[in-house]
Every structure is written in C-alpha cells, then in structure tokens.
Amino acid sequence: MPDTDVLRLRGGNRTQGTISIRGSKNALPKIMVAAMLTSEPSRIGNVSWIRDTQIVGEMIEAYGGSARRVGTELAVEVPDLVPPSQDVLGDLNRRSRIPVLSCGPALHRSGEAFISTPGGCTIGARPVDFHLDVLRSLGVVMTEAEGGLRLTAPTRLRGARIELSYPSVGATEQFLLASCLAEGDSLLTNAAVEPEILDLIYVLQKMGALISVETNRQITVTGVDRLRGFAHDVIPDRLEAASWASLALATDGEITVSGVRQADLATYLNTYRRAGGEFAASPDGTEISFWRDRSMLRPLALETNVHPGFMTDWQSPFVTALTQADGISVIHETVYEDRTGYVAALEALGANVGLFTECLGPTHCRFGRGNHPHSIVVVGPNKLQGTELHVPDLRAGFSYVVAAAAASGLSTISGIDLLDRGYEDFRTKIAAVGIDID
C-alpha cells in the first residue's frame, strides 16, 4: 500500500486550474469553541473538513456535547458541559493548540478547567503565559496539577482591564470567550484585530454578547447573563488563498481561487503585484485569478507583522516564490521566532538563501536580542532541483510543495499529512492545477 504521509512530486510544469476554498482554519475551530458557551444548538456553515475541525469536534464530544456533519454544515450542541479527565484534555492539547481556548466555556458552565502546553505546529514557543494572564485578571484561581494547571472559578468571573504586551491572537480569543459572560465590563488593550478575530466577535454578538471594537486596538466587553445558539458562515481562508497564489507565482502559472474575500487579502495582493505578479478579481471579490506578469520576478524587502501587516502565515510560500526573483530579497519575520525552518529545505533544493539572527527590517522586533534566526536573505534567480524533504509545520509544508513544483525533477516530501490540518482535499487540489504527483 502507498504511504499516505509521503508525496512524490515531479516539478517543472506550469500550474493552471481553479481551486475552491472554504472556511478559515484560523476562524472555524474558535467558532466551534464559542458554541460551547451555550446549551442551545448552533449551526456553522462554509466549513472546511480539515483535521483541526475533527480534533475540536472530538474535544466538544469529550465535554459531553456533539459536533455532527449535517450536509455542508456543522451542527454543534453542548446541553450539559462536563469537563473530561485531565488525561483526555492533555492528549487534546498535545494534538492542537485550540483546546486551551475551552477554558472560558468550561469555567463559565462548570466552574473548572484544565490547561497544559498547547500543541500544533512547531513555529515558536507559543507560551500560554498570555492566556494565563488574561484568565487570572478575570478572577480565575490556578493550582498546579500533574501535566498542567487546574483552573477554578468559585464564583462568576469578573470584568477586568487588561493590556497585552503583544497583540496575541490567541490571548485576544481567550479574552473574548472568557469575558463575554463575566460580571461587569472588561477592556483589552493592544488586542489582535485580525479578520478571524472579528468573525469570532460577530458570532458572539449573534449569541447575545455586547462587544465593541474601539480604536487603537481596544476591545470592550460588557458581560451578559446567558448566551444563545447561532447560525453563522465562516469567513473564507485567506491563508490558503495566498498559498495557491504563491504557487502560481513560483511556477509561472495561472491559478483561480474561488470562495475568497478580496478585502481580507488586500495587503497580500499589493505585495504580490510588487513582486511582479498580477491578479484579476470578480466584481464581488469572491474569485481571484493569479499569474506572473513578467518573465522574471522582482526582489523585495518584506516584513511580517500582525494585521493589517503581511501575515506570518503568508511568508514561507511567498518567500519560496522569491527564489525565482532576479536579485536580493530580504525578509524579516516578527511574529514567530521559529517560522524559518523551511530555509534548510530551500538550500537542499539549490536555493541561494541565508538565515540571520539580526533584525533585517525597519522594526526592531522582540526576537532581535534573543539569538533567534528570524531574518532571511534570498539571492535569485535559483534553478531548483528535486530532492528529499520532510515537512516541519503546516505553512512550511505548502512552501515545500511550491518549491518542488518549481524545481526540475522528482522530490519526495515526507510528513505531508501535516498539511491535512489546514488544507481541505489537499492532494486532489494540487493534482487539479497540473502538478504531477504519485
């Protein structure tokens, strides 16, 4: 039988085709967690049937609820929330970082929760300190337990004023899920304001929450006594859309992505055009075609940042495309300190690329003094040659596919199952755009 965790890919062909994408991997699981805040049933549409959806569904079932596929929708209901054992929660945390967000629903509905080091891709420390600080501020009591921390809320959580040292997406989500049923007003300063955060806020508003997004990254929440069920279509996955666009750029192909929102891709589209790519959007912005507008790509100086900056998740596939640019590109990663693990693979494929601990960008980021290799220099154009690769994380995994598709000859990529966490029907889609795979 074939090894499903290994992809054999023959590169050098021009990609062409249409890809349809659905709900955002960074939004859908958090919306599923929000459904745990109420005993009433909820319906979620535009669902991506990816591995993270399955894991969060298992978590909901572990808490005594159900997450069922009904046609193209997901039906979630948790009539009586009962926290599972610490062993079960620990296993879920090792498989994904999403279960850490179940603390708010568990504390509100049962008075207790358990937290351990979250899993997910290896792209940095991803400490839970921000999450813990948010929960402590809201009145949660924490005691050490085997494998993590036991959290209790003897009484109703109370509103608090919280300032994040960094606009963490996870900590902002924790704040929203924990404060919406807390007593009184809560204020989060230096909050994350990504489209996925706003989508979660829209869901909580449908449930009856009182949430205002203020200027200067401030979010105000007035706690309510109860929340109700909801029906909601998840926003499209802007990360996946950009991944396919980068593939078209690297292979001098033309790929049309449907089911998107142009507004969510505005920063990426500007950078794409600067590099020598071009695109055409439908009148409503839900379908975008991507192609290369010049024979040789332009080199760029690029820095990742929180929204509305250039997303860290866009970085590795796009930088892989820049191996085909005529000149020197400089990339400064400021969000995750270890999101450069794919650079060694580019070197193995024949790319002229270097990794540096200095901040090679206008921002002196928090990794500059920590000896973290977080800046990349690419000297192109490079003639890539197929080789053997192993996927370290989700977005790097797609960048390997981009690089292998742009390379001559056969590449063998192991650890490819990791891409099932974020790309629905991944193998079917890459074959649909003309990539030669076994």
Image (cartoon, grey):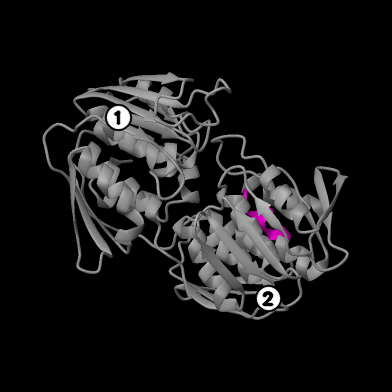
Q: 10 Å neighbourhood of mark 1: few (<14), some, or many (≥20)? A: some
**Taking the image as drawn, is residue 103 in sight?**
yes
User: Disc 1 residue type?
Assistant: Leu
Q: Position of residue 427 (x, y in %)?
A: 37, 49
Quadrant where the C terminus is found in the figure: top left
Q: Which residues are magenta?
A: 97-103
Q: Is residue 435 visible?
A: no
Foreground: disc 1 or disc 2: 2
Indicate which disc, 1 or 2, sits on the residue closer to the N terminus. Answer: 2
The image shows residue 98 at horizontal and vertical percentages of 62, 53
Q: Main secondary structure of the magenta part?
A: helix
Is residue 428 depicted above or below 227 in this figure?
above
Residue at 62 percent across and 74 percent down: it is 209
Q: Estimate the spatial distance between the alpha carbons at disc 1 and disc 2, rounded to whole Å.
A: 51 Å
Side of 340 relative to 366 (left or right): left
Q: Which residue is mark 2?
A: 38
Mark 1 secondary-structure assignment: strand
Estimate how packed mark 2 is, as few (under 14), some (14 to 19) or many (20 or more) residues with alpha carbons within 10 Å. Answer: many
Task: Tell me where residue 124 appears, x and y as whole percent.
Answer: 57, 34
Q: Amino acid at mark 2?
A: Thr
* Left/right of residue 432 with respect to residue 29 in the rendered view: left
Magenta highlight on residue 101: yes
Residue topped by disc 1: 410
Residue at 62% in and 71% down: 35
